Image: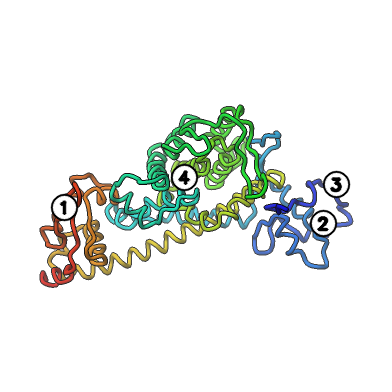
Amino acid sequence: MARNTIEKAPFEFSHSLYKIEENYNYLLKYKEVDNKGRYFFWDEFKYRVPKEDDAKIAWWATKWARFTKMKSIEYKDKDKKVFSFCMPDALQAKLHRISKLSAQGIVPHNSIKRNYLISSLLMEEAISSSQLEGASTTRRVAKKMLSSGRKPRNEDELMIVNNYLLMQEVKRTKNEDLTIDMILKYHKIATRENQNNGNIAGTFRSNNEIVITDGFEVVHEPPCFKNIPKRLNIVCEFANKEHLGENGEIFIHPIVKAIILHFMIGYEHPFPDGNGRTARAIFYWYMLKNGFDYFEYVSISKLLKDAPTQYGKSFLYSENDDNDLTYFIFYQVDIIIRAIDELLNYLQDKSKEFEEVTQLLSTSKIGNSLNFIQKDIVKKAIKNPGRIFTSKEIMLDYDKTANTARKYLNELVDYEILATIKNGNTKGYIAPANIRDVLENNK
């Protein structure tokens, strides 16, 4: 027999379910989160209730605390019940941490050094988002394909290329308002040449045959396909409206709003395929639109891919507990913090590598003549003798023109750090094994 993905809550919340005067101590004791700031659903909450307390009354008291802090938004489910969320101190503290990092500036402002440090990160979300959707190509092969500009050889590689192009489109449109045409454009790019489940790139589903299962049973049935344009118009209105807490309007933190938009597209499931990629693209669009520029280099899909079950549960908790979006928000905020921590660790390691290369080059006459990008190429060449570089790879990795990329490579050939080689129909630049000797001989 199939096992439910999540256990249902014991009741639908009502203030009058238990007598206040008899259970006042519960209302004083239980808050919207536990003493560690965690926002549990019933299936985990019940195991953390002390033995001397009644778990159901404790749940009722917790729901009461949450209800008093709920903010409703202009969005309803298919049964016309509103979605809402609350902002416990624990969640606000996490958002403050993310915003503080943004204000400090995670990525260096120097454009060349920035490109050196984050070149491979530009591809990370495209690869991880594809793997989350089932693509089986390895990261090494995927990065090599994107760097070289090689055409995809199969559906998995095509998905990665499409996601890479999608992230470029997100950057291009970051200052625009969200429209149905933009959503369709995102989907068209994400699912180019993809006909899975009857998908037509850039076209809404035309039936209600799509359902989401846990492998055993249906856990989510999206709203009727006939209502997709109308419902997505509401999503767009929500996205484009400013929620600044002025003139009687509620305040919604930009990060929270981006996460809610992610949830909305997942709930609507407007396409036969590619809904997750489109939802995450809209999340990134809203983050970039609101000044979180470094999110271009933060990959949430990489961490979502590592725990897809928890990702799915965060949707289900919100949908099955009075449309409480706080579950999904908490989970995504934790993912964002972990992704930022990974970015910071990556930048620290890359900076260390860069300093090592700089130290090596500082004793050579050649060193002073090289820019950050060329030094990065030298580092890669030293680590990988025999590696072949192309001007297209450098152009894509560092966002340079083809002429500038060739210029950088040809200068390294002049210094005998690289050597030219025929690489199919293109000119390649191979890393010899004696680069350290070349630098030593030019002191």
Q: Secondary structure at mark 2?
A: helix
* SS of the residue under disc 3: helix
Above or below, 434 relative to 392: below
Q: Position of residue 226 (x, y in %)?
A: 61, 27
Q: Is residue 369 left or right of residue 382?
A: left
Q: Amino acid at mark 1?
A: Lys
Question: Where residue 423 sits: x, y (%)?
Answer: 19, 52
Mark 4, Cα crowd under 10 Å, few <14 / some 14-19 / many 20+, is many
Q: Nearer the viewer, mark 1 or mark 3?
A: 1
Tell me which amino acid carries mark 3.
Answer: Ser
Q: Which residue is mark 4?
A: 284
Circle 1 — which element?
Answer: strand
Quadrant of the image occupied by residue 75: top right
Q: Tell me the tag on residue 16.
A: 3
Say whether residue 177 is visible: no
Q: Is residue 380 left or right of residue 313?
A: left
Mark drawn on residue 57: 2
Which one is nearer the viewer's eye here, 319 or 156? 156
Mark 4 or 3, nearer chain start: 3
Identify the residue under disc 1.
Answer: 422
Where, by quadrant of the figure, is residue 378 drawn? bottom left
